[in-house]
Amino acid sequence: MVTASLGHREGASIFVFTIYPLPFTIYYLPLMTAPNIETIVSLAKRRGFVFPSSEIYGGLGSAWDYGPLGVELCNNVKQAWWRWMVYERDDIEGLDSSIILNRLVWKYSGHEDTFSDPLVDCRECKTRLRADKLEMADNVYAGIEVDQDDSQNFLEKITFAIRRKSYKCPNCGSTDLTDPRPFNLMFRTHVGAASEEDDSSLVYLRPETAQGIFINFANVLTTSRRKLPFGIAQIGKSFRNEVTPGNFIFRTREFEQMEMEYFVRPGEDESAHQDWIDACQNWFTSLGITSTNLRLYEQPKEELAHYAKRTVDIQYRFFPERPEDERQWDELMGIANRTDFDLRTHSKKPEDAEAKRLNPDSTDDLSYFDEAAKERFYPYVIEPAAGVNRTVLAVLMDAYTEKTNDKGEKRVILKLHPDLAPIKVAVLPLAKNKPEIVTLAKSIKQSLQPHLRAVYDDTGGIGKLYARQDEIGTPFCVTVDHESLQDDAVTVRDRDTWEQERIKVADLQEYLLKRLKT
Ligand code: ATP
């Protein structure tokens, strides 16, 4: 027996065949999960999930527009997150804060000073690069890595390494690189009719939704009469002038975040943090993402943000095509223990050793008074922060499946979780030139629509219509045929198994709703 395995990787057999002694039998295991992001880019454009933005004017680097199916998928991801975070728990409130906040928010949060990437220019090809994303050069200095133990000196150390030519430009391979310099990622704009030179009108587009939550801590606490522990959840757009955006919707300059700040007593932060790490991992698998395509990454000390005590990322295997396992993974979500940094920094009370207020601009104190213990303190914060767009990408990659039909033709099936599928059921007439069939099919679609997202489609033969719905992840197709006019029944076809069942029209809604929940 000869067994050959081409491109096999953990959790996803790309193409495996086994040859027995005569007669030859070839077994194809279906392709499970997308082989690379490009496969999803092409599916997304072909079927109307995501389009390159401003395409008719030559596009705008790394900006994407969500089409008819993409907007539904994004909404379903956000709804699933909100349901899980806010509705199914008893300790979380929702919020929708402004995108443009008082500039002082970003001064005291530390973003004005520290929200930057180290920027390097390649003198050869003029590409702008992130110093922490450079490639090792192929010269005698290769392998002499920057020692990142002391984060204070990271910039100095990488400068030394660049001057020593240890690194090369990933675009042209040149080692002729400039010294790194900090590049602030916040987009700047001006409010009101003031001139662009007038610094008093300067504001930023928010680079994270979290600060809108911290500055509303006291408002939510008082109005909702909450006691610790409790959380505030928010979904919204964030903006970062990324130096190297790319990989489709993985890294863009405008994106959407789903963030929750969970406030706890100091001392209870470590166990709350661990609980949220476990809960978030479970949430992703509950969306149907294969657990072998998820892993935890503990941020080392030198990578931690200035406010963080511990941060664990949930990573997804976004780059399965890369030969080295380590390079296949990247961040899907970050779960940080932000300590009491944020509430303290936005409060008017804290003082330094000389009794000087650390924040002379704030008009409020964001501390918490514990009635039972009769003590006042600044709560610690656990922050699970995920990107909507990265979740959509992970969900699409993970749902992508190829299957061969009995005619030997390759079919793409998007095995989306029913809650996420943009369309839950497609109603298809077997003969579009038969008015009674068309009328019945359209009326079935109308009756289902208030209960689940349904579409009617008669723009092709039944095989083509099934294939189209499989490719966009519709869990069920309902076919109305000649017999339906006699027996008041329709054929329901399952996306994943292609099995068909005859169901009475009167029972159809209940049947579909039940199957969509299992
Ligand atoms: P990265 O290291 O990839 O730049 P980050 O650690 O800066 O991400 P966070 O500040 O922790 O990201 O933001 C929380 C989440 O927001 C990320 O896990 C990611 O899903 C999403 N996100 C952050 N930046 C972007 C971006 N430029 N485009 C799309 N999603 C993003």
Image: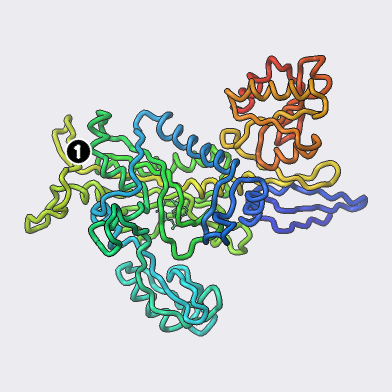
Q: How does the figure colour the protein chain or chains?
A: rainbow
Mark 1 closeness class: few <14, some 14–19, many ≥20 residues within 10 Å: some
Compared to 405, does 305 lie above or below? below
Is label 1 in a helix, a strand or a loop?
A: strand
Query: Could you tell me how many numbered marks the image carries?
Result: 1
Q: Is residue 87 left or right of residue 452?
A: left
Q: Is residue 82 left or right of residue 498?
A: left
Which of the two residues, 156 or 245, is positioned nearer the viewer here? 245
Residue at the far right in the pictured view: 23
Q: Residue at x 31, y 56 (%)?
A: 190
Indicate the quadrant where residue 121 lies.
Answer: bottom left
> Residue 184: image x %, image y %?
35, 64
Q: Which residue is mark 1?
A: 368
Q: Under 8 Å from ligand 1: the CB of mark 1?
A: no
Q: Can residue 307 be seen by looking at this rendering?
A: no
> Residue 429: image x %, image y %?
77, 28
Dividing the image into four equal quarters, which quarter contains ligand 1? Answer: bottom left
Which of the two residues, 312 or 410, is positioned nearer the viewer here? 410
